């Protein structure tokens, strides 16, 4: 993986973690404490269905991305990594 | 003590009264299109009321819808004058309870001040108060129920409690809501609104359509009605209300809240499950609601259950839903038939039962109407006929 | 019905003891009193553990209801048949206006579903039920100044009909800046405050900790001033409890 790409992904992950904490009102966890491969739903961060649709809004507002199909969403939202990769691959420059 | 239902009133996209509603049911008319009442970027179909009669030009649309249904119900109950009667008014709603006028707020947001006309409209527009005023009813028994999607059912349940505990002789109970930008945008953001006509209980269902309207029942003790010269045909036999205590927007997957509400309502009605001829389900056409509700109804009543969702005709009318559906349940018993559930085509194997696909005769004496609300409320009513 | 527990959140803090102290130190200049509940009061890592997304409206309700339940000494088993009735004049209007902000800023398709779900009047009751794991009947009502009065009537009915064995009845309202603006123009004479007060009511005489409360059926037909709000009732209940005459005091209206 090129340095540039890794740098960008790292920046996205960092921003994502900050947004998750602030936008979803996550308590007792700081952005830097969230692991890159942290699973978002169920175990890991323990997010729920309301958080899922809130993340859709978060993606729209901060990265200009639309997630139309929540079934597709399930795969994208699996972990911080999968979400960051999706953003990197699709975000409007 | 028997509680009689002596008057019914209904207005929705199906029609502005019961006769028009029954016609729509027969012809399976689905009057939906993108909203025209207000500007919106959302083009999903909604069930908007046509040709709304304006009783009060200064009032919120919800109040005008309510007054239409009240007028029909009161007329059917043959009440010309409420003086001398102890009366209660209990109405369920969601939108009409909220101070959410976006024009007022957008000006206030910009300038730090704004004209308060719309606020006045809101403060003077409490449905129960205005309905009582309109009929010259003087009473302290005025209540507005805001239990989200089960408000209409719960308002009727409160009316039942008032009568059983002898707080009054007659209750005007029901629910009303108008199409509004806040719930349209809100439900849209939750990802549960369909871009097409809704398909309750169908395996390919993709969400709800919003609607608007009002449903009203006149409730009174049977002996009181008879003294007035009315021979009641319909009765409110039982009511159940139970909380999921699970999640703000998702229903409890095991359906235990709904089950308990049904058990309570049947116990009050003093009948066994087998006596229920049909169920008017909540059936919003969201993946979650229909799965939980459908599975629970199958578990409780068995595979042969006859049930329907009328939301394919009216859309999800929020605060009005439970009340409109109580009216439709009454009609199903009184008229001897229930309509097809529009939008439904193929059974969902995860649910395992199908709603009516065509006009179906009803022969039994008892029926159930169920409502499941945001916030985890599960309510139902048992209605019977002579 | 008997009052077995009390819980209160108000501008002076949380809890009956704080409220009694505030009543004793009656401020001669009421307009100088704070009208808002401080955010510090709404922090409770245990009770509000599952309420990270909840707005202040809901948090006030959950804390006051929880305190009333704890005050009653009822056990876990009692939660299965615990009813909840929330009475509010204006509901979570602060969140409603934040949702309108979203519509104006981001458009119809860009709004927050979390804000929307918390802008519905019955969100607080839903959180109370989840927090206490209470599966009984749960209702929210709004009737401007008569909300709480209607709630007591319904609670009385529910207990008589055995819809639940015990019921939490609460009054709850917020004072957001938009509401302050409106009240300043429309009702200068009232001194609005935000807060929440909950009562655990029961038919079980053995649980009576404070006094009994009842509504006179006949009076519901005459129009009279029914501005009994939940804070007034707390004051009456505390007075009844502290009455040295020690007979079972009945508050009736």
Image: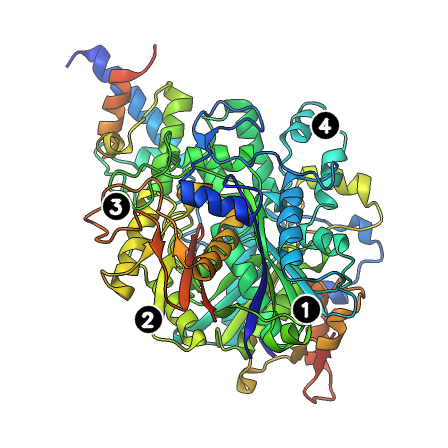
Q: How many marks?
A: 4
Could you confirm whether marks 4 and 2 are on the same chain? Answer: yes
- Relative to B303, say whether B205 is above or below: above
Q: Earlier in the sequence, mark 4 or mark 2?
A: 4
Rendered position, B170 above or below C176: below
Q: Position of residue B231 (x, y in %)?
A: 59, 71
* Element type at mark 1: helix
Circle 1/circle 2 CB separation < 8 Å: no
Give the number of the disc on residue A46. none
User: How far is disc 3 from disc 1 in space, using C-alphas?
Assistant: 42 Å
* Residue bearing the label numbered 1: C234
Which chain hosts label 4?
B
User: How many other residues sit within 10 Å of disc 4, few (<14), some (14-19) or many (≥20)?
Assistant: few
Residue bearing mark 3: A42
Q: Is residue B227 left or right of residue C43?
A: right
Q: Residue at x 75, y 28 (%)?
A: B113
Q: Is residue C114 above or below residue C16?
A: above
Instruction: Please determine if labels 3 and 4 lie on a single subunit.
Output: no
How crowded pointer 3 is (Cα within 10 Å; few <14, some 14-19, many 20+) is rated as few
Question: With C31 as the anchor, is C237 left or right in this view?
Answer: left
Chain that bears disc 3: A
In the drawing, does residue B261 fall left or right of residue B80? left
| Residue corresponding to mark 2 | B273
Q: CA gap, disc 2 to disc 3?
A: 37 Å
Q: Nearer the viewer, mark 1 or mark 2?
A: 2
Looking at the rendered structure, whether the residues under marks 1 and 2 are on a common chain is answered as no
Q: Quadrant of residue B243?
A: bottom left
Dot 3 falls on a residue whose secondary structure is: loop
Q: Position of residue B174 (x, y in %)?
A: 58, 56
Residue at which label 4 appears: B112
Residue drawn at point x = 24 percent, y = 17 percent:
A89
């Amino acid at each position: 993986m090129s340095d540039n790409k890794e740098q960008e992904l790292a920046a996205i992950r960092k921003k994502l973690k900050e947004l998750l904490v602030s936008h979803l009102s996550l308590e007792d966890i700081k952005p830097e404490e969230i692991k890159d491969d942290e699973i978002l739903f169920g175990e890991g961060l323990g997010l729920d269905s309301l958080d899922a649709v809130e993340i859709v809004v978060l993606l729209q507002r901060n990265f200009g991305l639309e997630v139309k199909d929540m079934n597709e969403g399930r795969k994208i939202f699996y972990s911080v990594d999968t979400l960051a990769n999706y953003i990197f691959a699709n975000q409007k420059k | 003590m028997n509680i009689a239902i002596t008057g019914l009133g209904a207005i929705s996209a199906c029609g502005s009264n019961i006769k028009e509603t029954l016609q729509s049911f027969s012809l399976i008319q689905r009057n939906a299109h993108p909203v025209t009442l207000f500007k919106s970027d959302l083009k999903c179909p909604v069930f908007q009321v046509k040709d709304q009669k304006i009783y009060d030009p200064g009032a919120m649309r919800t109040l005008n819808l309510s007054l239409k249904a009240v007028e029909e119900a009161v007329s059917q109950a043959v009440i010309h004058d409420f003086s001398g009667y102890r009366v209660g008014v209990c109405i369920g709603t969601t939108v009409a309870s909220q101070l959410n006028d976006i024009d007022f707020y957008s000006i206030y947001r910009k300038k730090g001040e704004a004209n308060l006309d719309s606020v006045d409209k809101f403060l003077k527009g409490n449905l129960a108060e205005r309905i009582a005023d309109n009929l010259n009813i003087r009473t302290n028994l005025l209540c507005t129920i805001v239990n989200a999607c089960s408000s209409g059912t719960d308002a009727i349940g409160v009316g039942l409690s008032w009568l059983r505990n002898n707080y009054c002789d007659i209750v005007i109970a029901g629910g009303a809501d108008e199409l509004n930008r806040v719930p349209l945008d809100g439900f849209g953001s939750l990802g549960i609104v369909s871009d097409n006509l809704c398909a309750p209980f169908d395996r390919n269902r993709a969400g709800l359509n919003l609607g608007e309207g009002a449903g009203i029942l006149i409730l009174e003790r049977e002996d009181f009605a008879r003294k007035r010269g009315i021979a009641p045909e319909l009765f409110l036999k039982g009511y159940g209300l139970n909380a999921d205590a699970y999640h703000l927007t998702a229903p409890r997957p095991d359906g235990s809240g709904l089950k308990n509400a049904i058990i309570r309502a049947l116990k009050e009605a003093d009948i066994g499950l087998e006596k229920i001829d049909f169920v008017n389900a909540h059936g919003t056409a969201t993946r979650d609601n229909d799965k939980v509700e459908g599975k629970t109804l199958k578990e409780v009543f068995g595979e042969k259950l006859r049930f329907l969702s009328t939301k394919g005709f009216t859309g999800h009318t929020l605060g009005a839903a439970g009340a409109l559906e109580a009216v439709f349940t009454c009609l199903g018993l009184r008229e001897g038939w229930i309509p097809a559930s529009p939008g439904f085509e193929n059974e969902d194997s995860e649910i395992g039962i199908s709603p009516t696909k065509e006009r179906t005769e009803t022969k039994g004496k008892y029926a159930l109407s169920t409502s499941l609300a945001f916030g985890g409320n599960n309510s139902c009513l048992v209605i019977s006929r002579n | 019905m008997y009052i077995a527990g009390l819980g209160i959140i108000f501008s002076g803090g949380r809890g009956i003891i704080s409220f009694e102290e505030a009543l004793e130190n009656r401020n001669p200049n009421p307009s100088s009193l704070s009208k808002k509940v401080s955010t510090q009061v709404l922090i409770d890592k245990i009770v509000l553990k599952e309420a990270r997304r909840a707005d202040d409206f809901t948090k006030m309700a959950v804390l006051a209801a929880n305190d009333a339940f704890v005050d009653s000494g009822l056990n876990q088993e009692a939660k299965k048949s615990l009813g909840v009735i929330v009475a509010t004049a204006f509901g979570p209007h602060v969140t409603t206006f934040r949702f309108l902000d979203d519509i104006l800023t981001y458009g119809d398709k860009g709004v927050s579903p979390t804000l929307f779900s918390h802008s519905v009047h019955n969100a607080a009751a839903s959180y109370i039920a989840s927090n206490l794991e209470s599966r009984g009947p749960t209702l929210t009502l709004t009737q401007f100044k008569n909300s709480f009065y209607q709630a007591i009537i319904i609670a009385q009915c529910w207990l008589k009909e055995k819809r639940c064995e015990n019921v939490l009845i609460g009054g709850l309202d917020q004072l957001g800046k938009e509401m302050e603006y409106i009240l300043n123009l429309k009702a200068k004479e009232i001194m609005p405050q935000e807060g929440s007060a909950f009562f655990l009511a029961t038919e079980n005489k053995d649980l009576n900790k404070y006094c009994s409360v009842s509504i006179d059926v006949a009076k519901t037909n005459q129009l009279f001033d029914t501005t009994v709000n939940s804070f007034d009732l707390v004051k009456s209940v505390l007075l009844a409890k502290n009455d040295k005459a020690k007979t079972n005091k009945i508050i009736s209206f």
